[in-house]
Image: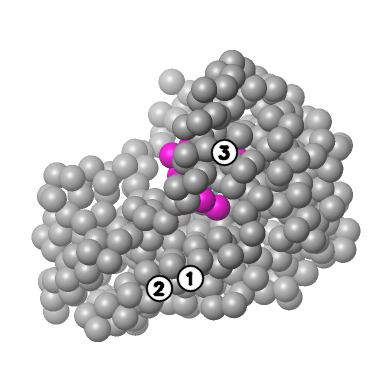
Amino acid sequence: MNPLYASLPTTIFTRMSALAVEHGAVNLGQGFPDFGWPEDVVERAAEALRGSNQYAPMPGLPELREAVAEHYRGHQGLAVDPAEVTVTSGATEALAAALMALITPGDEVLLFQPLYDAYLPLVLRAGGVPRFVRLAPPDWRITAEALAEAFTPRTKLVVFNNPHNPSSRVFTPEELSLLAEAAIAHDAIVLSDEVWEHVVFDGLSHIPLASLPGMAERTVKVGSAGKIFSLTGWKVGWAVAPPRLAAPIAKAHQFLTFSTAPNLQSAVAFGLAKGEAYFETMRRDFAAARDVLVDGLRGAGFVTLPAEGTYFVSVDLRASGIEAGDADFCERAVREAGVAAIPLSSFYAEDPVTHVVRLCFAKRPETLAQGIAAMAAARRLFG
Ligand SMILES: Cc1ncc(COP(=O)(O)O)c(C=O)c1O
């Protein structure tokens, strides 16, 4: 086995989900919704199975590439040419293709911690040399000082994620400007993982990094139909990039998966044309679920951190009067109280934050009620 994979433990999501099954616990660990997908999009995919079931064109069905371009024009004011869109098998494949195509071994790659679990193994496998910007609770703020310390003349690429999983932050225009200025000053590419772009709450709106001055030419924007339509199992994503970056990404994609299920692509193209009402309802429903979980957790004596976007809310154990570390808390919570959560320390490669745990609120009321009762029981385990 490649030593990189040999050294990697089983992911915390797999471990916690297995423990949840073993102990009959409610699973608020892994981030998938159990409600909220549009039935007409699912219906469209079912119907499209009666059409072509052969290989789709390598960069994606023309109708989906056009729909992605039109969607971003309408919702985010971006001028995207369909030729700049490469359809991939999930955002994860877009990230893999971009990193394989754009990094030469030895290039420095800047990553923000806490980080989505796929980033670091992909960067390392591509030969990148990671440098970390550490974000910390309660505000998880990006500062000019932290960027100045992390960027060097060898920085080739920045992996950025906004809205951010697992902190649930939507970065401010000022923070985005700091990042853009640093990337331009160092002539770095930004791989901007924006899969949560529609899952933002409280009137916030998503600002695509490519919309900042000087950024369109150096940004690879990654999206995912899984998050937009609450259909995470579909694994339909895309990379949007200017021609000098889109061409190498398409080459890498050609030798990864080559193409993605045509019926799913066709259904996603249909869904992306939905009007604002769909997206507003989706956000309203997830915000309501978030409020149910947050109120329940507060009622059980926990201090929660703001959840501005994504499907997740974090509990600050220390602020809740719990001295145990996040991994210990999660281990006992799943075994003894019947709820699976994810320790934030597992999202750090070095110098972890160890007093925060992440819970998924994209669940039906009965699942949330069970989760809240079990979290209250977990609270009692820790005095
Ligand atoms: C930040 C981030 N990027 C990428 C992904 C993966 O997206 P996909 O399922 O489309 O590969 C996720 C899924 O949770 C995510 O949170």
Residue drawn 27% across and 66% down?
Answer: 365
The circle on residue 267 is 3
- Earlier in the chain: of badge 2 and badge 3, it is 3
Q: Farthest top residue?
A: 54
- Disc 2 designates what residue? 288
Residue drawn 24% across and 61% down?
Answer: 367
**What is the CA distance from the residue labelled 2 to the residue labelled 1?**
6 Å
| Residue type pointed to by label 3 | Ala
Instruction: Where is residue 10? Give x, y as percent.
Output: 34, 38
Residue sitting nearer the eye, 374 or 315: 374
Colour convention of the picture: one colour
Quarter containing the N terminus: top left
- Disc 1 designates what residue? 284
Tell me the quarter of the picture where residue 330 sits: bottom left
Residue drawn 54% across and 29% down?
Answer: 48
The circle on residue 271 is none
Closer mark to the observer between disc 1 and disc 3: 3
Left/right placement of residue 328 relative to residue 355 reads left
Residue sitting nearer the eye, 210 or 234: 234
Q: Is residue 169 above or below residue 151?
A: below
Dot 1: what SS?
Answer: helix
Residue 233 colored in magenta in the image: yes
| Residue type pointed to by label 1 | Arg
Q: Residues within 10 Å of mark 1 (few under 14, many from 20)?
A: some
Q: Is there CB contact under 8 Å for labels 2 and 3?
A: no
Dot 2: what SS?
Answer: helix
